[in-house]
Image (cartoon, rainbow, N blue to C red):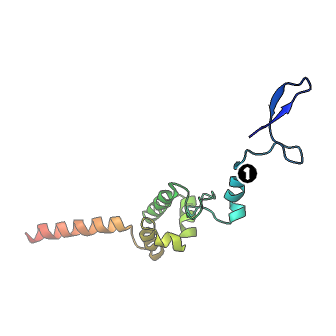
Amino acid sequence: MAKRTRSPKGAATDAAPTTPAGTPAAPEGQAAAEATASPESTGRRCLCGCGETPKPRRDYRQGHDARLVGFFTRALRGQATADEAARAQAVISHPAVLESSKAGPLARALAAGEPHPDDTARLEARQKAEDASKAG
């Protein structure tokens, strides 16, 4: 909140708060949030590889777990860009990624050199249907 000061003529004005060095201070709470949110201060970064800092007790920024799933999916299907493939390989063995219900199965498949789990299920269903039509 800005402190009230008096101008030379006596009228009250709103002045921005300043630091002891005379530079404008950040609004209350903002400086504390910035200090705790910087990756350099916490050492934590989003696991998708974007470099942003997730909220406390989180491994990803909002929506970035889906981004990582997309990286894994494209890498498994051979459609990933070099950057996406590098990001996927960088976090493939991270415990939080392996425990994830979305990214975990894809990370394990990518590490093992297996096809995408959805593709495998589709191929198995197609094979069963073909076998049933040949038998009948």
Viewer-proximal residue among 93 and 34 = 34
**Count of labels in the image:** 1
Q: Is residue 77 above or below residue 20?
A: below
Q: Is residue 1 something that shows in the picture?
A: yes
The residue that disc 1 covers is 31
- Counting from the top left corner in percent of width and height, residue 9 is at 90, 23
**Could you tell me which residue is drawn at 16 percent across and 70 percent down?**
131
Q: Secondary structure at mark 1?
A: helix
- Which quadrant holds residue 11? top right
Q: Disc 1 residue type?
A: Ala
- Counting from the top left corner in percent of width and height, residue 97 is at 50, 69
**Could you tell me which residue is drawn at 67 percent across and 57 percent down?**
37
- Which quadrant holds residue 48? bottom right
Viewer-proximal residue among 82 and 90 = 90
Viewer-proximal residue among 80 and 57 = 57
Q: Is residue 58 above or below residue 28?
A: below
Q: Is residue 93 something that shows in the picture?
A: no
- Which quadrant holds residue 3? top right
Question: Mark 1 Cα within 10 Å, few/some/many (few <14, many 20+)?
Answer: few
- Counting from the top left corner in percent of width and height, residue 54 is at 59, 59
- Counting from the top left corner in percent of width and height, residue 64 is at 52, 57
**Residue most extreme to the bottom:** 112
Quadrant housing the N terminus: top right
**Could you tell me which residue is drawn at 50 percent across and 57 percent down?**
67
**Residue most extreme to the top:** 9
